[in-house]
Image: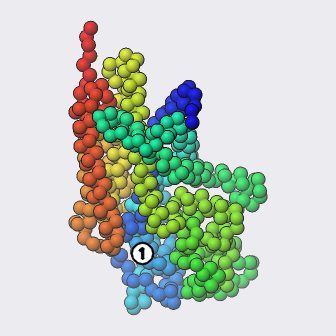
Amino acid sequence: MKLPTDVVKMYKEVHGWVGIISGLCLFIAFYAGALTMFELPLQRWASPPPTLAPAPSLERTPELVAKVLAAHPQAAKGYDINLVIDAAHPARMTWMVRGEADEHGGGQRYYASLTPDGALQVESQGPSEVAQLIDVLHQQVGLPFDHEISMPIMGAIALLYTIALVSGLVVLLPSLVSDLFALRIGRNVKRMWLDVHNVLGLFSLPFHIIMALTAVVFAFHDQFYGAQGMAFGGGAERARPSLSAPAEGPPPATLTPAQIVARVREQAPGFTPETLVYGQGRGGLPALRVQGSDARYGLRAPTYGMAGIDPQTGAITGTDYMPGMQDGWSATITSFFALHFGNFGGNTIRWAYFLLGLAGAFLFYTGNLLWVESRRKKERKAGAVEQTRATRILGALTVGVPMGSIAGISVTLAAAKLLGSHASYGMHSVIYYAIFLIATGWALARGAARSGVELAILGAVAMLCIPAASLIAGTGWYDAPALMLVDLTAVLLAVLLFLSGRAAARRAAAGPRDSVWSTNRPVVDPG
Protein backbone atom coordinates (compact mmCIF):
# COMPACT_ATOMS: atom_id res chain seq x y z
CA MET A 1 0.00 0.00 0.00
CA LYS A 2 1.58 3.23 -1.18
CA LEU A 3 0.81 6.48 0.61
CA PRO A 4 2.05 9.95 -0.32
CA THR A 5 5.37 10.77 1.35
CA ASP A 6 4.07 13.98 2.88
CA VAL A 7 1.14 12.12 4.47
CA VAL A 8 3.45 9.54 6.02
CA LYS A 9 5.78 12.28 7.24
CA MET A 10 2.90 14.16 8.86
CA TYR A 11 1.63 11.06 10.64
CA LYS A 12 5.16 10.23 11.73
CA GLU A 13 5.43 13.65 13.40
CA VAL A 14 2.05 13.17 15.06
CA HIS A 15 2.99 9.67 16.23
CA GLY A 16 6.29 10.90 17.68
CA TRP A 17 4.96 13.90 19.58
CA VAL A 18 1.85 12.17 20.88
CA GLY A 19 3.90 9.15 21.90
CA ILE A 20 6.50 11.13 23.83
CA ILE A 21 3.79 13.09 25.67
CA SER A 22 1.80 10.04 26.74
CA GLY A 23 4.47 7.32 26.71
CA LEU A 24 5.93 7.87 30.17
CA CYS A 25 2.55 7.75 31.89
CA LEU A 26 1.46 4.78 29.80
CA PHE A 27 4.58 2.85 30.80
CA ILE A 28 3.51 3.11 34.46
CA ALA A 29 -0.09 2.22 33.61
CA PHE A 30 0.88 -0.89 31.61
CA TYR A 31 3.57 -2.11 34.00
CA ALA A 32 1.32 -1.73 37.06
CA GLY A 33 -1.64 -3.09 35.09
CA ALA A 34 0.31 -6.24 34.20
CA LEU A 35 0.94 -6.85 37.90
CA THR A 36 -2.74 -6.41 38.77
CA MET A 37 -3.54 -9.49 36.69
CA PHE A 38 -2.31 -11.44 39.72
CA GLU A 39 -3.63 -9.17 42.44
CA LEU A 40 -4.89 -11.99 44.67
CA PRO A 41 -1.59 -13.95 44.63
CA LEU A 42 0.18 -10.66 45.43
CA GLN A 43 -2.11 -10.17 48.41
CA ARG A 44 -1.55 -13.74 49.58
CA TRP A 45 2.21 -13.21 49.31
CA ALA A 46 2.28 -9.79 50.99
CA SER A 47 -0.38 -10.14 53.70
CA PRO A 48 0.70 -11.00 57.25
CA PRO A 49 -0.65 -14.16 58.89
CA PRO A 50 -4.20 -13.60 60.21
CA THR A 51 -4.60 -13.35 63.98
CA LEU A 52 -8.38 -13.72 63.94
CA ALA A 53 -9.98 -16.99 64.92
CA PRO A 54 -11.04 -19.17 61.96
CA ALA A 55 -14.18 -17.95 60.27
CA PRO A 56 -17.40 -19.43 61.71
CA SER A 57 -19.60 -21.51 59.45
CA LEU A 58 -22.41 -19.89 57.51
CA GLU A 59 -24.86 -21.50 59.92
CA ARG A 60 -23.21 -19.63 62.82
CA THR A 61 -22.88 -16.36 60.89
CA PRO A 62 -26.22 -14.93 62.21
CA GLU A 63 -24.75 -15.25 65.71
CA LEU A 64 -21.65 -13.35 64.59
CA VAL A 65 -23.76 -10.61 62.97
CA ALA A 66 -25.93 -10.20 66.06
CA LYS A 67 -22.91 -9.82 68.34
CA VAL A 68 -21.21 -7.35 66.01
CA LEU A 69 -24.32 -5.18 65.72
CA ALA A 70 -24.78 -5.21 69.50
CA ALA A 71 -21.18 -4.14 70.13
CA HIS A 72 -20.76 -1.93 67.04
CA PRO A 73 -24.19 -0.57 66.00
CA GLN A 74 -22.59 1.61 63.29
CA ALA A 75 -21.96 -1.60 61.30
CA ALA A 76 -25.71 -1.81 60.61
CA LYS A 77 -25.28 0.87 57.92
CA GLY A 78 -23.43 -1.64 55.76
CA TYR A 79 -21.40 -4.79 56.18
CA ASP A 80 -20.09 -7.69 54.11
CA ILE A 81 -20.42 -11.41 54.72
CA ASN A 82 -17.52 -13.14 52.97
CA LEU A 83 -18.38 -16.59 51.68
CA VAL A 84 -14.82 -17.28 50.48
CA ILE A 85 -12.07 -16.69 53.04
CA ASP A 86 -8.75 -15.74 51.46
CA ALA A 87 -5.98 -13.17 51.68
CA ALA A 88 -8.25 -10.37 50.46
CA HIS A 89 -11.14 -11.45 52.74
CA PRO A 90 -9.61 -12.92 55.91
CA ALA A 91 -12.77 -12.66 58.07
CA ARG A 92 -16.35 -13.81 57.73
CA MET A 93 -17.73 -10.32 58.48
CA THR A 94 -16.23 -6.94 57.62
CA TRP A 95 -17.53 -3.38 57.69
CA MET A 96 -16.35 0.17 57.10
CA VAL A 97 -16.81 3.06 59.52
CA ARG A 98 -16.96 6.27 57.52
CA GLY A 99 -15.28 9.38 58.88
CA GLU A 100 -12.58 7.56 60.86
CA ALA A 101 -9.13 8.65 59.78
CA ASP A 102 -7.21 6.45 57.43
CA GLU A 103 -4.41 6.98 54.97
CA HIS A 104 -6.30 6.93 51.70
CA GLY A 105 -9.77 8.17 52.56
CA GLY A 106 -13.05 6.34 52.89
CA GLY A 107 -12.90 5.19 56.52
CA GLN A 108 -11.57 2.42 58.74
CA ARG A 109 -12.36 -1.20 57.92
CA TYR A 110 -12.98 -3.76 60.67
CA TYR A 111 -12.84 -7.57 60.62
CA ALA A 112 -14.83 -9.84 62.95
CA SER A 113 -14.87 -13.51 63.90
CA LEU A 114 -15.94 -15.76 66.77
CA THR A 115 -13.52 -17.55 69.06
CA PRO A 116 -14.10 -21.26 69.71
CA ASP A 117 -16.02 -20.40 72.90
CA GLY A 118 -18.29 -17.99 71.01
CA ALA A 119 -16.71 -14.68 72.09
CA LEU A 120 -16.64 -11.81 69.58
CA GLN A 121 -13.23 -10.94 68.15
CA VAL A 122 -12.78 -7.67 66.21
CA GLU A 123 -9.62 -6.29 64.58
CA SER A 124 -8.81 -3.35 62.35
CA GLN A 125 -5.67 -4.84 60.79
CA GLY A 126 -6.50 -6.55 57.52
CA PRO A 127 -4.70 -7.80 54.40
CA SER A 128 -1.85 -5.86 52.83
CA GLU A 129 -2.90 -2.83 50.81
CA VAL A 130 0.12 -2.86 48.50
CA ALA A 131 -1.90 -4.52 45.71
CA GLN A 132 -4.44 -1.71 45.99
CA LEU A 133 -1.66 0.87 45.56
CA ILE A 134 -0.45 -0.89 42.41
CA ASP A 135 -4.00 -0.91 41.06
CA VAL A 136 -4.37 2.82 41.76
CA LEU A 137 -1.06 3.51 39.98
CA HIS A 138 -2.47 1.60 37.01
CA GLN A 139 -5.79 3.46 37.03
CA GLN A 140 -4.26 6.91 37.49
CA VAL A 141 -1.19 6.38 35.24
CA GLY A 142 1.05 7.04 38.23
CA LEU A 143 -0.39 10.47 39.06
CA PRO A 144 -0.33 11.24 42.83
CA PHE A 145 -3.57 13.25 42.81
CA ASP A 146 -7.10 12.57 44.01
CA HIS A 147 -9.06 10.13 41.88
CA GLU A 148 -11.42 12.84 40.63
CA ILE A 149 -8.48 14.88 39.34
CA SER A 150 -6.40 12.01 37.96
CA MET A 151 -9.11 10.28 35.94
CA PRO A 152 -9.81 13.11 33.44
CA ILE A 153 -6.05 13.44 32.92
CA MET A 154 -5.86 9.70 32.36
CA GLY A 155 -8.70 10.03 29.86
CA ALA A 156 -6.82 12.71 27.93
CA ILE A 157 -3.73 10.48 27.87
CA ALA A 158 -5.86 7.58 26.63
CA LEU A 159 -7.14 9.77 23.78
CA LEU A 160 -3.54 10.67 22.88
CA TYR A 161 -2.75 6.97 23.07
CA THR A 162 -5.50 6.26 20.50
CA ILE A 163 -4.08 8.93 18.18
CA ALA A 164 -0.61 7.39 18.54
CA LEU A 165 -1.97 3.95 17.56
CA VAL A 166 -3.69 5.25 14.43
CA SER A 167 -0.77 7.41 13.32
CA GLY A 168 1.73 4.63 14.00
CA LEU A 169 -0.25 2.23 11.83
CA VAL A 170 -0.33 4.78 9.00
CA VAL A 171 3.46 5.23 9.28
CA LEU A 172 4.03 1.47 9.14
CA LEU A 173 1.69 0.74 6.22
CA PRO A 174 4.10 1.62 3.37
CA SER A 175 6.71 -0.89 4.56
CA LEU A 176 4.33 -3.35 6.20
CA VAL A 177 5.10 -6.35 4.01
CA SER A 178 8.88 -5.90 3.79
CA ASP A 179 9.44 -4.98 7.45
CA LEU A 180 6.78 -7.08 9.17
CA PHE A 181 9.06 -9.93 10.24
CA ALA A 182 12.32 -8.02 10.00
CA LEU A 183 14.42 -7.90 13.13
CA ARG A 184 17.80 -6.58 12.08
CA ILE A 185 20.20 -7.22 14.95
CA GLY A 186 23.56 -5.61 14.39
CA ARG A 187 25.59 -2.49 14.91
CA ASN A 188 22.71 -0.19 13.95
CA VAL A 189 21.05 -0.17 17.37
CA LYS A 190 18.42 2.36 16.37
CA ARG A 191 17.33 0.17 13.45
CA MET A 192 17.05 -2.82 15.75
CA TRP A 193 14.95 -0.89 18.31
CA LEU A 194 12.70 0.37 15.51
CA ASP A 195 12.13 -3.19 14.26
CA VAL A 196 11.30 -4.39 17.79
CA HIS A 197 8.98 -1.44 18.32
CA ASN A 198 7.15 -2.04 15.03
CA VAL A 199 6.72 -5.78 15.55
CA LEU A 200 5.47 -5.36 19.12
CA GLY A 201 3.13 -2.57 18.11
CA LEU A 202 1.61 -4.36 15.14
CA PHE A 203 1.04 -7.78 16.70
CA SER A 204 -0.38 -6.33 19.92
CA LEU A 205 -2.48 -3.70 18.10
CA PRO A 206 -5.89 -5.31 18.91
CA PHE A 207 -4.94 -5.43 22.60
CA HIS A 208 -3.85 -1.79 22.56
CA ILE A 209 -7.02 -0.67 20.79
CA ILE A 210 -9.07 -2.41 23.49
CA MET A 211 -7.03 -0.78 26.25
CA ALA A 212 -7.24 2.69 24.70
CA LEU A 213 -11.00 2.64 24.08
CA THR A 214 -11.92 1.10 27.43
CA ALA A 215 -9.63 3.50 29.29
CA VAL A 216 -11.51 6.41 27.73
CA VAL A 217 -14.80 4.83 28.88
CA PHE A 218 -13.47 4.45 32.44
CA ALA A 219 -12.09 7.97 32.58
CA PHE A 220 -15.34 9.60 31.46
CA HIS A 221 -17.62 6.99 33.02
CA ASP A 222 -19.94 9.48 34.77
CA GLN A 223 -20.23 11.74 31.74
CA PHE A 224 -21.09 8.81 29.43
CA TYR A 225 -23.78 7.50 31.76
CA GLY A 226 -25.19 10.98 32.27
CA ALA A 227 -25.50 11.38 28.51
CA GLN A 228 -27.05 7.92 28.27
CA GLY A 229 -29.63 8.85 30.87
CA MET A 230 -30.52 12.05 29.04
CA ALA A 231 -30.77 10.29 25.67
CA PHE A 232 -32.61 7.12 26.65
CA GLY A 233 -34.06 7.88 30.06
CA GLY A 234 -33.11 5.89 33.11
CA GLY A 235 -29.70 4.94 31.80
CA ALA A 236 -27.86 6.73 34.59
CA GLU A 237 -29.85 4.83 37.18
CA ARG A 238 -29.07 1.51 35.49
CA ALA A 239 -25.38 2.33 35.53
CA ARG A 240 -25.15 2.07 39.29
CA PRO A 241 -27.29 -0.77 40.61
CA SER A 242 -28.49 0.18 44.06
CA LEU A 243 -28.98 -2.26 46.87
CA SER A 244 -32.47 -3.69 46.46
CA ALA A 245 -35.00 -2.69 49.09
CA PRO A 246 -38.39 -4.12 50.06
CA ALA A 247 -41.65 -2.21 49.85
CA GLU A 248 -42.82 0.18 52.58
CA GLY A 249 -44.22 -1.32 55.78
CA PRO A 250 -43.02 -3.48 58.67
CA PRO A 251 -40.00 -5.47 57.45
CA PRO A 252 -40.49 -9.23 57.48
CA ALA A 253 -37.75 -11.51 58.75
CA THR A 254 -34.72 -11.75 56.46
CA LEU A 255 -33.22 -15.02 55.32
CA THR A 256 -29.95 -16.21 56.83
CA PRO A 257 -26.76 -16.02 54.72
CA ALA A 258 -26.86 -19.79 54.18
CA GLN A 259 -30.45 -19.54 52.91
CA ILE A 260 -29.56 -16.61 50.65
CA VAL A 261 -26.69 -18.57 49.10
CA ALA A 262 -28.96 -21.58 48.51
CA ARG A 263 -31.60 -19.41 46.82
CA VAL A 264 -29.04 -17.71 44.58
CA ARG A 265 -27.62 -21.05 43.48
CA GLU A 266 -31.11 -22.26 42.61
CA GLN A 267 -31.75 -19.23 40.37
CA ALA A 268 -28.25 -18.99 38.84
CA PRO A 269 -26.68 -22.48 38.86
CA GLY A 270 -23.41 -21.43 37.18
CA PHE A 271 -22.83 -18.44 39.45
CA THR A 272 -20.50 -18.79 42.46
CA PRO A 273 -21.48 -16.41 45.30
CA GLU A 274 -18.46 -14.95 47.06
CA THR A 275 -19.67 -11.96 49.12
CA LEU A 276 -23.03 -10.82 50.51
CA VAL A 277 -23.14 -7.02 50.78
CA TYR A 278 -25.74 -5.81 53.28
CA GLY A 279 -26.89 -2.21 53.50
CA GLN A 280 -29.89 0.01 54.02
CA GLY A 281 -32.41 0.85 51.31
CA ARG A 282 -35.43 3.12 51.33
CA GLY A 283 -36.50 4.17 54.83
CA GLY A 284 -33.56 2.34 56.40
CA LEU A 285 -34.96 -1.07 55.44
CA PRO A 286 -32.56 -3.98 54.82
CA ALA A 287 -31.00 -4.20 51.37
CA LEU A 288 -28.68 -6.76 49.84
CA ARG A 289 -26.58 -7.63 46.81
CA VAL A 290 -24.48 -10.68 46.08
CA GLN A 291 -21.05 -10.58 44.43
CA GLY A 292 -19.48 -13.54 42.72
CA SER A 293 -18.21 -15.00 39.46
CA ASP A 294 -19.23 -17.24 36.61
CA ALA A 295 -16.44 -18.76 34.51
CA ARG A 296 -18.69 -18.79 31.43
CA TYR A 297 -19.01 -15.00 31.25
CA GLY A 298 -17.01 -11.80 31.50
CA LEU A 299 -17.48 -9.75 34.66
CA ARG A 300 -18.31 -6.09 35.23
CA ALA A 301 -15.76 -5.59 38.04
CA PRO A 302 -12.16 -6.88 37.87
CA THR A 303 -12.97 -10.09 39.75
CA TYR A 304 -16.74 -10.27 40.25
CA GLY A 305 -20.24 -9.67 38.90
CA MET A 306 -23.18 -8.77 41.12
CA ALA A 307 -26.94 -8.93 41.49
CA GLY A 308 -29.54 -7.24 43.66
CA ILE A 309 -31.25 -9.64 46.07
CA ASP A 310 -34.48 -9.42 48.04
CA PRO A 311 -33.22 -10.13 51.59
CA GLN A 312 -36.61 -11.55 52.67
CA THR A 313 -37.12 -14.06 49.84
CA GLY A 314 -33.66 -14.45 48.27
CA ALA A 315 -35.09 -13.62 44.84
CA ILE A 316 -32.75 -11.97 42.34
CA THR A 317 -34.18 -8.50 41.70
CA GLY A 318 -31.38 -6.69 39.84
CA THR A 319 -29.53 -8.32 36.94
CA ASP A 320 -27.80 -5.40 35.16
CA TYR A 321 -24.42 -6.59 36.47
CA MET A 322 -25.28 -10.29 36.84
CA PRO A 323 -23.27 -12.51 34.43
CA GLY A 324 -25.55 -14.70 32.36
CA MET A 325 -28.72 -12.79 33.27
CA GLN A 326 -28.08 -9.40 31.64
CA ASP A 327 -30.04 -7.89 28.80
CA GLY A 328 -28.29 -6.99 25.54
CA TRP A 329 -27.32 -3.45 26.57
CA SER A 330 -25.91 -4.43 29.95
CA ALA A 331 -24.01 -7.36 28.45
CA THR A 332 -22.51 -5.04 25.82
CA ILE A 333 -21.32 -2.58 28.47
CA THR A 334 -19.95 -5.43 30.57
CA SER A 335 -17.94 -6.69 27.58
CA PHE A 336 -15.94 -3.43 27.60
CA PHE A 337 -15.04 -3.95 31.25
CA ALA A 338 -14.25 -7.64 30.80
CA LEU A 339 -11.99 -6.95 27.82
CA HIS A 340 -10.02 -4.40 29.85
CA PHE A 341 -9.77 -6.51 33.02
CA GLY A 342 -9.08 -9.81 31.24
CA ASN A 343 -11.40 -11.60 33.66
CA PHE A 344 -12.58 -14.21 31.14
CA GLY A 345 -10.92 -17.35 29.83
CA GLY A 346 -9.25 -18.28 33.12
CA ASN A 347 -5.48 -18.32 33.68
CA THR A 348 -4.69 -18.51 29.96
CA ILE A 349 -6.12 -15.03 29.33
CA ARG A 350 -4.68 -13.76 32.61
CA TRP A 351 -1.16 -14.78 31.64
CA ALA A 352 -1.66 -13.44 28.12
CA TYR A 353 -2.74 -10.07 29.52
CA PHE A 354 0.22 -10.08 31.91
CA LEU A 355 2.70 -10.62 29.07
CA LEU A 356 0.91 -8.15 26.79
CA GLY A 357 1.00 -5.58 29.59
CA LEU A 358 4.76 -5.96 30.01
CA ALA A 359 5.22 -5.89 26.23
CA GLY A 360 3.11 -2.72 26.12
CA ALA A 361 5.30 -1.05 28.72
CA PHE A 362 8.36 -2.05 26.69
CA LEU A 363 6.67 -0.68 23.55
CA PHE A 364 6.34 2.78 25.11
CA TYR A 365 9.92 2.63 26.40
CA THR A 366 11.34 1.77 22.97
CA GLY A 367 9.12 4.42 21.37
CA ASN A 368 10.59 7.10 23.62
CA LEU A 369 14.12 5.87 22.93
CA LEU A 370 13.53 6.16 19.21
CA TRP A 371 11.95 9.60 19.46
CA VAL A 372 14.82 11.03 21.52
CA GLU A 373 17.44 9.62 19.16
CA SER A 374 15.54 10.89 16.10
CA ARG A 375 15.35 14.33 17.66
CA ARG A 376 19.10 14.32 18.17
CA LYS A 377 19.59 13.29 14.52
CA LYS A 378 17.56 16.29 13.38
CA GLU A 379 19.58 18.60 15.62
CA ARG A 380 22.81 17.21 14.16
CA LYS A 381 21.60 17.84 10.62
CA ALA A 382 20.72 21.40 11.63
CA GLY A 383 24.32 21.96 12.69
CA ALA A 384 23.99 21.58 16.46
CA VAL A 385 27.08 20.06 18.06
CA GLU A 386 25.98 19.94 21.69
CA GLN A 387 22.77 18.24 22.66
CA THR A 388 20.01 20.70 23.48
CA ARG A 389 18.69 20.92 27.01
CA ALA A 390 15.28 19.62 25.89
CA THR A 391 16.85 16.51 24.37
CA ARG A 392 18.92 15.84 27.49
CA ILE A 393 15.86 16.22 29.73
CA LEU A 394 13.67 13.98 27.57
CA GLY A 395 16.38 11.34 27.45
CA ALA A 396 16.80 11.44 31.22
CA LEU A 397 13.04 11.17 31.82
CA THR A 398 12.85 8.25 29.39
CA VAL A 399 15.22 6.40 31.71
CA GLY A 400 14.21 7.80 35.10
CA VAL A 401 10.43 7.42 34.97
CA PRO A 402 10.27 3.73 33.92
CA MET A 403 13.16 2.63 36.13
CA GLY A 404 11.84 4.68 39.04
CA SER A 405 8.42 3.07 38.72
CA ILE A 406 9.87 -0.44 38.55
CA ALA A 407 12.15 0.15 41.54
CA GLY A 408 9.43 1.91 43.56
CA ILE A 409 6.89 -0.89 43.11
CA SER A 410 9.51 -3.55 43.89
CA VAL A 411 10.71 -1.88 47.10
CA THR A 412 7.20 -1.23 48.42
CA LEU A 413 6.27 -4.86 47.70
CA ALA A 414 9.27 -6.00 49.73
CA ALA A 415 8.27 -3.56 52.49
CA ALA A 416 4.80 -5.12 52.59
CA LYS A 417 6.33 -8.52 53.26
CA LEU A 418 8.77 -7.29 55.92
CA LEU A 419 6.56 -4.78 57.77
CA GLY A 420 3.37 -6.82 57.75
CA SER A 421 0.39 -5.06 59.31
CA HIS A 422 2.52 -1.95 60.05
CA ALA A 423 2.76 -1.16 56.32
CA SER A 424 -0.30 0.99 55.67
CA TYR A 425 -1.52 2.28 52.31
CA GLY A 426 -0.02 5.69 53.11
CA MET A 427 3.34 4.15 53.93
CA HIS A 428 3.36 2.21 50.66
CA SER A 429 2.58 5.43 48.78
CA VAL A 430 5.44 7.26 50.50
CA ILE A 431 7.91 4.45 49.74
CA TYR A 432 6.88 4.23 46.09
CA TYR A 433 6.92 7.95 45.33
CA ALA A 434 10.16 8.50 47.28
CA ILE A 435 11.97 5.85 45.20
CA PHE A 436 10.31 7.09 42.02
CA LEU A 437 11.32 10.74 42.59
CA ILE A 438 14.86 9.82 43.66
CA ALA A 439 15.36 7.72 40.50
CA THR A 440 13.90 10.43 38.26
CA GLY A 441 16.02 13.12 39.91
CA TRP A 442 19.11 10.93 39.61
CA ALA A 443 18.46 10.49 35.89
CA LEU A 444 18.10 14.25 35.39
CA ALA A 445 21.31 14.90 37.33
CA ARG A 446 23.43 12.13 35.77
CA GLY A 447 22.08 12.17 32.23
CA ALA A 448 20.44 9.45 30.17
CA ALA A 449 23.60 7.49 29.33
CA ARG A 450 25.05 7.11 32.84
CA SER A 451 21.72 6.77 34.64
CA GLY A 452 20.57 4.20 32.07
CA VAL A 453 23.23 1.84 33.41
CA GLU A 454 22.92 2.81 37.08
CA LEU A 455 19.13 2.75 37.29
CA ALA A 456 18.89 -0.59 35.47
CA ILE A 457 21.12 -2.04 38.21
CA LEU A 458 18.98 -0.28 40.83
CA GLY A 459 15.86 -1.85 39.30
CA ALA A 460 17.45 -5.30 39.33
CA VAL A 461 18.51 -4.94 42.98
CA ALA A 462 15.06 -3.61 43.93
CA MET A 463 13.44 -6.56 42.17
CA LEU A 464 15.66 -8.98 44.09
CA CYS A 465 14.43 -7.39 47.33
CA ILE A 466 11.13 -9.24 46.76
CA PRO A 467 12.48 -12.82 47.07
CA ALA A 468 14.89 -11.59 49.76
CA ALA A 469 11.91 -10.36 51.78
CA SER A 470 10.31 -13.80 51.39
CA LEU A 471 13.40 -15.46 52.82
CA ILE A 472 13.61 -13.02 55.73
CA ALA A 473 9.92 -13.04 56.62
CA GLY A 474 9.34 -16.76 56.20
CA THR A 475 6.36 -18.48 54.57
CA GLY A 476 3.62 -16.66 56.52
CA TRP A 477 0.20 -16.27 54.95
CA TYR A 478 0.96 -16.97 51.29
CA ASP A 479 0.76 -20.42 49.72
CA ALA A 480 3.26 -22.20 47.52
CA PRO A 481 1.75 -21.11 44.15
CA ALA A 482 1.85 -17.46 45.23
CA LEU A 483 5.46 -17.88 46.39
CA MET A 484 6.49 -19.39 43.06
CA LEU A 485 4.59 -16.81 41.02
CA VAL A 486 5.78 -13.67 42.82
CA ASP A 487 9.35 -14.58 43.71
CA LEU A 488 10.33 -16.40 40.52
CA THR A 489 8.82 -13.67 38.36
CA ALA A 490 10.80 -11.10 40.33
CA VAL A 491 14.04 -13.03 39.81
CA LEU A 492 13.38 -13.34 36.07
CA LEU A 493 12.66 -9.61 35.72
CA ALA A 494 15.78 -8.81 37.77
CA VAL A 495 17.90 -10.83 35.33
CA LEU A 496 16.36 -8.98 32.37
CA LEU A 497 17.06 -5.62 34.02
CA PHE A 498 20.66 -6.59 34.72
CA LEU A 499 21.14 -7.62 31.09
CA SER A 500 19.61 -4.33 29.92
CA GLY A 501 22.05 -2.50 32.19
CA ARG A 502 24.99 -4.29 30.56
CA ALA A 503 23.64 -3.44 27.11
CA ALA A 504 23.25 0.20 28.15
CA ALA A 505 26.83 0.23 29.41
CA ARG A 506 28.13 -1.07 26.08
CA ARG A 507 26.03 1.46 24.19
CA ALA A 508 27.27 4.30 26.40
CA ALA A 509 30.92 3.34 25.87
CA ALA A 510 30.92 2.36 22.19
CA GLY A 511 27.98 4.21 20.69
CA PRO A 512 28.14 7.36 18.54
CA ARG A 513 29.84 10.16 20.45
CA ASP A 514 27.05 12.65 19.87
CA SER A 515 24.25 10.25 20.83
CA VAL A 516 22.04 10.97 23.84
CA TRP A 517 23.00 7.52 25.10
CA SER A 518 26.77 8.04 24.90
CA THR A 519 28.99 8.97 27.84
CA ASN A 520 31.57 10.40 25.45
CA ARG A 521 30.83 14.04 24.77
CA PRO A 522 31.42 15.20 21.18
CA VAL A 523 34.53 17.14 20.44
CA VAL A 524 33.71 20.75 19.56
CA ASP A 525 35.82 22.17 16.73
CA PRO A 526 37.02 25.61 17.92
CA GLY A 527 37.36 26.72 14.35
Numbered disc 1: secondary structure: loop
Image vertical order of residue 30 relative to residue 191, above or below: below
Which residue is found at the position 26% from the left and 44% from the top? 501
Q: Residues within 10 Å of mark 1 (few under 14, many from 20)?
A: some
Which residue is found at the position 42% from the left and 67% from the top? 40
The residue most toward the bottom is 117
Which is nearer the eye, 440 or 522?
Answer: 522
Residue type at mark 1 is: Asp
Mark 1 lies on residue? 86
Image vertical order of residue 175 relative to residue 73, above or below: above
Image vertical order of residue 345 relative to residue 230, above or below: below
The residue most toward the top is 527
Instruction: Answer with the quarter of the image where residue 467 lies.
Output: bottom left
Instruction: Answer with the quarter of the image where residue 162 lies.
Output: top right
The residue most toward the front is 178
Q: Position of residue 42 (x, y in %)?
A: 38, 65
Q: Where is residue 460 in the image (x, y as percent from the top left)?
A: 27, 51
Q: Quadrant of the C terminus?
A: top left
Which residue is found at the position 23% from the left and 37% from the top? 506
Q: Position of residue 484 (x, y in %)?
A: 31, 67
Which residue is found at the position 52% from the left and 35% from the top? 174
Q: Is residue 338 left or right of residue 111?
A: right
Residue 488 visible from this viewpoint = yes
Q: Quadrant of the N terminus?
A: top right
Q: In this view, does 86 lie to the left or right of 235?
A: left
